[in-house]
Image (cartoon, rainbow, N blue to C red):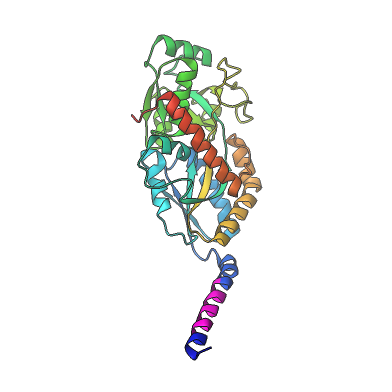
Amino acid sequence: MSSLSRRSWLLVAAASAAVLGAAPALAQTWPARNITWIVPFPAGGGTDAFARPLAAQLEQQLGQRIILENRAGAGGTVGAAAAAKAAPDGYTFFVGAAHHTIAPALYPRLDYNIEKDFIPVAVIAQPPQVIVAHPEKVQAKTLKELIDFATKNPDKLNYASAGNGTTHHLAGELFKLSSKSSLTHVPYRGAGPAMQDLLAGQVDLMFDGLGTSAPQIQGGRLRGLAVAAAERSPAIPDVPTAKEAGLEGYEVSTWYALWAPKGTPAEVVTKMRAEVAKALQSPMIDAAWQKSGSPIPTLSGDEFGKFVSSEVARWGKVVSEAKVKLD
């Protein structure tokens, strides 16, 4: 072997050893600074309701701050696009939601792919949705009364959503199809602003995740008409399921999850996944999730990735059958 070839071989061997040795070193030293979670909706919505307490618990476990960066717009797709383009260095993550599996069917020119441009970390919460009404603006005290009124008075009632293409929006469209009624859709730039206007009486109804609506129902500020799940929620046990209230087949759950940009080191993703699982078992999170009506989820990694793909297919079919168009 010539001296040049030997020198080249030694350089390659040294580089390979450095790469192989970097993984354990990275896993041991990460995180060495603050971590950013991009939240694609305004503060105060359902995503925030679960992301903030989880981040607080993880800060205690990791010994570093987790900064929530709200980037709202276009049904959560603006923040998702920003997260997809973030440096995959292990210090930026994306807190998305079920909305992001609906978006591909409604936004044909998305500059990111939720299935290909992210690494699935874990589902962090999975609360059912609930149909809520402003108690003074809407006279209906039961779901049947609401359907009767909406059927006889087309488009007189409106419903707020977190934006076009969100689960709030699609849940409303499914309700219209299932009940053969007609409502007017009022999209907002997030669940927080939508909830504020609902509480203020600027809109009539909302098909909302239980995480943000449960406290309002418990406090008497909103009237819960039905839970869109197979069983009643312990958080609001007096509110019937849609089936119990007379609407068969109407079940819609929302969920929130953590992703990493594609290219994030596997060791970092594995460690974050383990820390999230640990945090979800903590007494603080358990109590907070119970109050918000969400069971503790266990879906993570590859199984979570398969779930995302199934949701993309499911909501694509709903959008097509309901002929949903962006307002």
In this rendering, position of residue 68 left or right of residue 327: right
Whole-percent x and y of residue 119? 52, 52
285, 199: nearer the viewer: 285
198, 123: nearer the viewer: 123
Whole-percent x and y of residue 73? 36, 41
Q: Residue at x 57, y 76 (%)?
A: 17
Q: Residue furthest top?
A: 152
Residue 206, quarter of picture? top left
Residue 13 located within the stretch drawn in magenta: yes
In this rendering, position of residue 277 left or right of residue 212: right
- Main secondary structure type of the part rendered in magenta: helix
Residue 195 located within the stretch drawn in magenta: no
Q: Which residues are magenta?
A: 8-19
* Above/below status of 86 relative to 193: below
Q: Residue furthest left?
A: 327
Q: Residue furthest bottom?
A: 3
- The C terminus sits in image quarter: top left
Q: Residue at x 43, y 14 (%)?
A: 150
Can the viewer see residue 251 in this picture? yes
In this rendering, position of residue 89 left or right of residue 21: left
Counting the numbered discs, the total is 0
Can the viewer see residue 135 in this picture? no
Whole-percent x and y of residue 133? 47, 22
Residue 156, quarter of picture? top left
* Above/below status of 167 relative to 125: above
Whole-percent x and y of residue 216? 51, 30
252, 188: nearer the viewer: 252
* Above/below status of 255 relative to 5: above
